[in-house]
Image (tube, grey):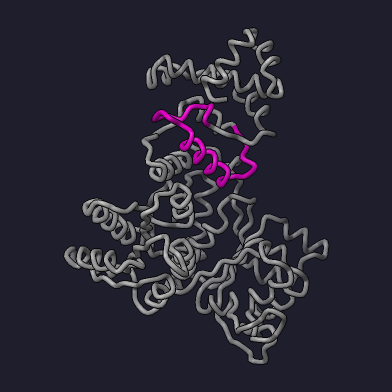
């Protein structure tokens, strides 16, 4: 019998969902706020969580973040009476399984619950044979298949792992996959981004502090390593740590113990360290900016994630995945890109890697009014547009797009794209753009307004 936790500050909603779930054969637990929910999650095996987004105290999005840090395998369905695309995007980006707007139909929530439970069961370790994805990471290129194989082999060990990769390549996804396929997957996975924490606070964040140890320390605080005991700690952007913190971290790795800031008690821990960096740490060691002994203890097993420009055969797979995701979020029926739009994406270099591609598709779905994304709905980095246009050249396979969307829409899309390009070349001067296109200023002004440029 699957156990489902319902979190909502409205008693009537908790009672309604409890009756519904028990009729369907589930065990239902309830909590009236995020803090109460966390206590029940830590004392019960939860198979699914259904939470309202807007609640007093710890809200649904904050609860979602804490749950994913504690146990990323628990699927979470978010509910709200205040439909907001921003809330939906935030929930899905932070790992929610689905997003439902109140009032909802009984059949709808029953379907989503059944799907979430089935997905959780089907995604349990050990092996997955899907050659296009692994543990939520999309890819079928030789480079990514090597990464998948390495994750499977090292996850059951306790070896510390160093993940190398440019920003946006999915380093945290890989870290979570290593944890989820390890022997401590039921224990905490605690991520921390070293570069996001002020230098004066990083020691307290990692090791915790005792009350009165410094100005502002009004109570005792648990640090990252204490939270992650018997689980995994993920240190992102490890190259940002100062020499003093590097020394203290080395002691943690050597002795498996530490003291809180201002504390006298030695705390023993058993934590696997997974770290990540977008720097060349080997060169940092040579230059004396990173401790050599710490480097070799943290990088027992290195994993190098390729940038997206080096695995372009994965782009169509990623596009399909993000199209499904954001079509669902924005309640649209967009199933594909035009052939020229896909050509534009495949020929682009992605300085922001997979994260940038996701943002491009998110904007494209939000802007597109038809059921197919056309090139003018793609927003690429300004400094890459000229290079993109030179690489892609004129479309060669557009005839299929004409048959799919019709001649009028096709011609309008092409005209809009050419006018947008002319405006960019003319520095947004309509007069100069009209001269480039050899049309009258009045005609161009009309078309700019028509296409919303």
Please determine whether, in this image, residue 219 is positioned above or below residue 74: below
Residue at 78% over, 64% down: 285
Report if residue 375 lies within the magenta region.
Answer: yes
- Residue 217 position within the rendered picture, expressed as x and y whole percent measured from the top left: 66, 81
Q: Is residue 69 left or right of residue 23?
A: right
Residue at 71% over, 63% down: 239
Please determine whether, in this image, residue 265 is positioned above or below residue 349: below
Outermost residue toward the bottom in this view: 264
Q: Examine the image and state in which quarter residue 72 appears.
A: bottom left
Q: Magenta residues: mostly which secondary structure?
A: helix
Q: Is residue 188 left or right of residue 31?
A: right
- Residue 124 position within the rendered picture, expressed as x and y whole percent measured from the top left: 36, 63
Outermost residue toward the left in this view: 23
Is 382 or 176 nearer to us in this picture?
382
Residue at 65% over, 7% down: 438
Query: In which quadrant of the rendered image does the C terminus lie?
Result: top right
Residue at 48% over, 64% down: 62
Is 163 or 361 nearer to us in this picture?
361
Q: Is residue 404 left or right of residue 158?
A: left
- Residue 181 position within the rendered picture, expressed as x and y whole percent measured from the top left: 44, 65
Query: In which quadrant of the rendered image does the N terminus lie?
Result: bottom left
Q: Which residues are magenta?
A: 348-377
């Amino acid at each position: 019998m699957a156990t489902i936790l319902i979190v909502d500050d409205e008693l009537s909603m908790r009672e309604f969902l409890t009756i519904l779930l028990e009729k369907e054969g589930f065990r239902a637990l309830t909590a009236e706020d995020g803090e109460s929910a966390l206590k029940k999650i830590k004392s019960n095996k939860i198979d699914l969580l259904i939470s309202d987004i807007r609640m007093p105290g710890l809200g649904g999005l904050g609860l979602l973040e804490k749950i994913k840090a504690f146990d990323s395998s628990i699927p979470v369905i978010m509910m709200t009476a205040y439909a907001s695309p921003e809330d939906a995007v935030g929930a899905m980006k932070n790992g929610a399984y689905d997003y439902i707007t109140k009032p909802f139909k009984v059949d709808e929530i029953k379907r989503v619950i059944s799907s979430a439970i089935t997905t959780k069961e089907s995604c349990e370790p050990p092996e997955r044979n899907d050659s296009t994805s692994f543990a939520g990471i999309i890819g079928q290129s030789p480079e990514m298949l090597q990464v998948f194989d390495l994750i499977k082999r090292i996850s059951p060990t306790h070896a510390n792992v160093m993940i190398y990769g440019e920003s946006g390549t999915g380093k945290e996804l890989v870290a979570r996959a290593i944890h989820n396929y390890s022997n401590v997957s039921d224990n905490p996975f605690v991520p921390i981004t070293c570069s996001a924490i002020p230098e004066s606070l990083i020691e307290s964040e990692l090791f915790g502090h005792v009350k009165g140890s410094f100005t502002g320390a009004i109570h005792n605080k648990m640090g990252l390593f204490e939270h992650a005991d018997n689980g995994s700690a993920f240190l992102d952007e490890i190259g940002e740590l100062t020499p003093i913190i590097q020394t203290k971290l080395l002691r943690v790795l050597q002795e498996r113990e530490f003291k809180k800031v201002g504390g006298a008690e030695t705390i023993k821990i058993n934590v696997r360290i997974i770290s990540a960096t977008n720097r060349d740490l080997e060169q940092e060691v040579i230059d004396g900016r990173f401790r050599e002994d710490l480097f070799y203890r943290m990088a027992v097993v290195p994993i190098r994630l390729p940038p997206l420009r080096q695995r372009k055969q994965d782009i169509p797979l990623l596009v399909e995945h993000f199209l499904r995701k954001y079509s669902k979020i924005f309640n649209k029926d967009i199933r594909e890109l035009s052939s020229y739009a896909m050509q534009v994406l495949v020929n682009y270099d992605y300085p922001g890697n997979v994260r940038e591609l996701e943002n491009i598709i998110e904007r494209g779905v939000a802007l597109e009014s038809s059921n197919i994304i056309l090139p003018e709905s793609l927003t690429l980095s300004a400094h890459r547009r000229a290079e993109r246009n030179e690489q892609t050249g004129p479309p060669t396979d557009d005839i299929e797009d004409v048959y799919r969307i019709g001649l009028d829409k096709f011609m309008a899309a092409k005209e809009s794209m050419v006018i947008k390009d002319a405006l960019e070349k003319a520095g947004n001067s309509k007069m100069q753009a009209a001269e480039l296109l050899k049309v009258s200023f009045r005609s161009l002004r009309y078309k700019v307004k028509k296409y919303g440029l």
